[in-house]
Amino acid sequence: MPRTASGAIVATSLVTARGSAPWRGAELGAPMVIEDAGIAWSDGVITFVGPAEELRGTDPEVFRGCTIAPGFVDCHTHLPFVGWRADEFELRLAGRSYRDLHGEGGIYRSARLFAEATDDEVMAFCRPLVAEMADHGTTAMELKTGYGLSVEGELRQARLARRLADEAPQATTVTLLACHAVPEAMEREDWVRTACAELIPAAAAEGLADAVDLYVEDIAFTLDDLRAVAEAAAAAGLPVRCHADQLGPSGAAEEAVKLGARSADHLNNVSNEGVRALGEGGTVGVLLPASTAFMRAVPPPVRTLVETGAAIALATDFNPGTSPVLSMPEAVATGCSLYGLTPLEAVTASTLNPAWVLGMAERAGTLEVGKRADLLVLEGEAFRQVPYRPGHNPVLHAYAGGTRVGGR
Ligand code: NIG
Ligand code: FE
């Protein structure tokens, strides 16, 4: 296939949500499906979506038995990081807990590995992972800090994230996970004060962050810390996001909604009040089924969330501790089998809704004239083939901005 920012293809079907606001409730599972469909783009921008017959005369490439879908938007990853932690996985299988390993292992270990590596080593570790994500259909994604654990360390990680973003073919945003773990030899309150007074303003001034995140957990940060970080983020003109109710309940989901957070992520132990708040509020519930499966954690009440009207998104949570999974097809497959999402709900939750979380829904997340030509040619006559074959890469071709960037 030629590498060009213009093209036209037809396939057995095309599926896409529409617009630039998150879809929720019954709408979530009702993206538009066109049988015998075509799409065309010019200079990286979509110029046509509709019946294949209307593309006759333009000599489109034909993919029989295939589905055209928007590129996956992975709105929760922990790249850039360096080094794996497979031994911790094995220890957990033998009975140790994530909380128990927090220190010798966990976030602190990844922070030590990051501090010991040179910038070039970090980049060399991450580059092939970003390419593997493109091969699995991720055409837009989030990068996050959180392994820096000092003002200088976090800024260094954010700069590396921007460097990775500059090289990556995907549209990419950077989230400053300012409060991920309390730096060793520091009191929690002192770190939160430093993050709010120094780190967040410095990252914003240097243009290093598109959002700010915080990990609310008994081993990490509190609701008061979330309020303080949200205030500092707002003062810096950045949206706030939050790791909420992952290992245990904390009330973080409802607090995130109250604070107008862009997203509340994980939600394994979300309270009924949190579900109600997400159902009524504008905060997207980001579900991370690969990390739930990998951690053998209790699944969030996903059907109740959808029925209550919450807007949900699916992402990988790609990180070396709780989710060494970078494949969005795998996240979709796990989201369907473990959380009971329908394949069409998974389409919206892995494209439009996460694009909104990343603040890029005006230009990505759906296949519509005027949006960036971020699209996939998937194996199978309908999107249902994607969750049906976990572990298999269904992405034949992935285009970002109209250029082929990955696939099989
Ligand atoms: O999203 N829970 C906090 N942060 C990550 C895990 C980070 C790690 O273990 O390195 C998560 O699961
Ligand atoms: Fe995470």
Image (cartoon, rainbow, N blue to C red):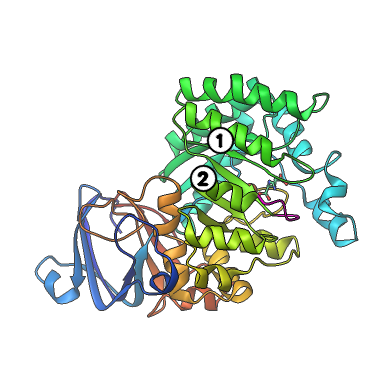
Q: Residue furthest right?
A: 95
Q: Residue at x 62, y 60 (%)?
A: 273
Magenta stretch secondary structure, dominant: loop
Res 145 → quadrant: top right
Which region is colored magenta? 246-251
In the image, 389 versus 125, the foreground residue is 389
Whether residue 72 appears in this view of the structure is no
Q: Is residue 252 left or right of residue 112?
A: left
In the image, 345 versus 7, the foreground residue is 345
Res 222 → quadrant: top right
Q: What is the x, y in percent for residue 256?
A: 57, 47
Secondary-structure class at tag 1: helix
Whether residue 287 appears in this view of the structure is yes
Secondary-structure class at tag 2: loop
Residue 230, which numbered label? 1
Residue assigned mark 2:
261
Where's the N terminus, which quadrant? Answer: bottom left
Q: Amino acid at mark 1?
A: Ala
Q: Amino acid at mark 2?
A: Ala
Are circles 1 and 2 on residues that touch, CB within 8 Å?
yes
Q: CA distance from mark 1 to mark 2?
A: 8 Å
272 w.r.t. 146: above or below: below
Badge 2: how crowded within 10 Å, few (<14), some, or many (20+)? Answer: many
